[in-house]
Image (spheres, grey):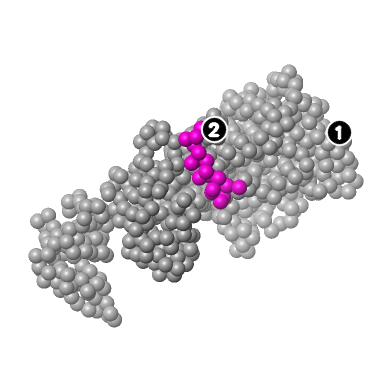
Amino acid sequence: MLANLPVTDIKGIGEKIAGELNDMGIQTVEDFLFHFPFRYDVHEIKPITEIEHQEKATLVGKVVSEPSLSFFGRKKSRLTVTLEVDHIAVKAVFFNQAFAKKHLQRGELVTVIGKWDQHRLQITVSQFQKGTIKKKDTHQPIYSLKGGISLGFFRKSMKQALNSFGTQIEEILPENYLTDYKIPARSKALQQMHFPENGILLKHAKRRFIYEELLLFQLKMQWLRKQKREATMGNAMNMDVTKINAFMDQLPFELTNAQKNVIKELLNDLKNPYQMNRLLQGDVGSGKTVVAAIGLYAAITAGKQGALMVPTEILAEQHFESLQELFGDKAEIVLLTGSVKGKKRKERLHKVKEQDADIVVGTHALIQDDVFFNDLGFVIVDEQHRFGVEQRRVLRDKGLQPDVLFMTATPIPRTLAITTFGDMDVSVIDEMPKGRKPVKTYWAKENMLDRVLNFVHKEIKQGHQAYVICPLVEESDKLDIQNAVDIHQQLQEFFPQDVRVGLMHGRLHTTEKDEVMKQFAQNELQILVSTTVVEVGVNVPNATMMLIYDAERFGLSQLHQLRGRVGRGDAQSYCILLADPKGETGKERMRIMTETNDGFELSEHDLKLRGPGDFFGKKQSGLPEFKVADLVQDYRALETARKDAVDMIESGRFFNDPSYKKLKIAIENDPIFNGQVLD
Ligand code: ADP
Ligand code: MG
């Protein structure tokens, strides 16, 4: 097998080169063959009239003048020559390529590649060769290489490798997928990746490897999901459907269809014998809490306990209150946060242990060592991205295997959801409750600040409140806190005495933060100047104004998240983005914000503008790295691959049908597939 042959089996590759290849992660012949070019230089020869100004162009022409060479500065040179291209005289300019002079003899044909200047009919040459470019060289593969390995040597060795081992490259996809999708065979596609005959064949080759890569990835995810499910069999809840229905009927509002669908999915999971592992996405205000509450209630009717974990104390308190209101005497709920201490804590812990408490709401204090549940059946984790993997594991390791639902208000583009949460089931609430007034969003330049502040004042005079957000670029950066302090000061000076302005930032102690938040919630503060710490979940329906300084410094999803703090009551709410973005992208982002209130639409834009790596913020993205596939561009292939993978696994063909054997082996041999990667 090619995966067992060392690279030194390729003719011309010795120990020294093998060492350098090793640094590039290439050890075997297979690794070598699958080291794909990261791009292709396209040398399409177009008629001069079709080449755009400043475009990189390839021209073939006849030398019709003596080349003239001049030197300037130290060691710098400029070589010019006139070429006749399509009966037009074109000037070719070579910088620091004096050696080219001897190749440019009158009457000779040459190919030059470089930047085209339409106005001067001139090309600044970066590459040239004698004669006409060969047709098959129109797509030149460029590899990322390390150490002393040259592109020329690498290509020569690739030719060698393909000649010697090309026939041993086995197809891994079942044949019907090749025919259905018109995908070229693996060995042929590989040949085209390295030595493309033309653009079309290259495109099909890429298409094949994109699909293959995504399919393998999705198969891993689906297989893992299946394993997880089977490992957690015996988790079925025996719920009281009549009670659940009665509970839903007495809600003060009609559930949206999206909510009803998600509830169905949840109840199904609870009822099924495997452990629930589901992600619920819903824009801010879409009504996730009530869905969570119904799920918790269902668990109670089955005689189980439920837990709701949230990232901050203030959120825990808010959820505690809204659940109490919803449940009345139907459930005993306790609040368990870090600030519940001493005797009170002991009492509550006792209740949890004896199952006198049906539901526990809290921060991560809820999973600390001293907390024991009697029969924990269902855990909901709100604002999932704030919770570390570690905390999730602790919960699981407490001996129980409760069903787990993760909720997030950060809309994650579908492609990312599929890849990062591929082993989870995903539910989406994609519909807002009726009668919601969308937040009106405006973009203002910073020189309009006075007008903006007067507008804020007008809202406050009507009894409403405002958030003012200052960016925190790098966490715990002194300057940013200073920024918040300054803006706080300025606003105190701008507004009359009776408008009380509070300040909140990351350096405050948790209890101080909670205190400020409480004052704002009770309208003791009319304005809250804050860094982005208010981002998550807080509910102050009387706040109708969100003013964001330096808005261009935030991502679209984050801006949307911040905007979600307002528009929670009956009154019309506003979001004002103060920004002077320099570039077009920045302006585009501000425009998009003013045009849509749809979090999913924004997240798709965000993904396009920032790329997948940046989407979840640095490092913590956990996104797999793909060799050929691009999550933004190849989302259709991703959807297809996912559908196919689910089908292969669920139907059992993947495990039983001999034509899937090679595919299965390919996955089993993949070092990242050990069940731990996705924990
Ligand atoms: P989020 O998804 O941001 O957590 P919430 O669950 O806090 O949203 O819901 C926001 C508000 O909408 C709450 O006051 C809640 O009572 C209300 N709500 C939820 N579902 C509906 C509905 N179907 N019709 C009307 N109001 C609803
Ligand atoms: Mg919520």
Q: Residue furthest bottom?
A: 74
Residue 553 in view of the camera = yes
- Amino acid under disc 2: Asn
In the image, which residues are magenta? 656-674
Q: Residue at x 62, y 53 (%)?
A: 531
- Of labels 1 and 2, earlier in sequence is 1
Q: Is residue 247 left or right of residue 176?
A: right
Residue 559 to residue 5: above or below: above
Percent coordinates x, y for residue 36 in the rendering: 40, 54
Mark 2 residue element: helix
Seen from the viewer's position, the closer of residues 669 and 409 is: 669
Residue 45 to residue 254: above or below: below
Q: Between tags 1 and 2, which lies in front?
A: 2
- Amino acid under disc 1: Asp
Is residue 670 covered in magenta?
yes
Percent coordinates x, y for residue 258 in the rendering: 58, 27
Q: Are marks 1 and 2 in contact (CB under 8 Å)?
A: no
Asked whether mark 2 and ligand 1 are closer than 8 Å, the reply comes as: no
Mark 1 residue element: loop
Seen from the viewer's position, the closer of residues 631 and 165 is: 165
- Mark 1 neighbour class, 10 Å CA radius: few under 14, some 14 to 19, many 20 or more: some
Q: Is residue 272 left or right of residue 91?
A: right
Q: Circle 2 sits on which residue?
A: 656
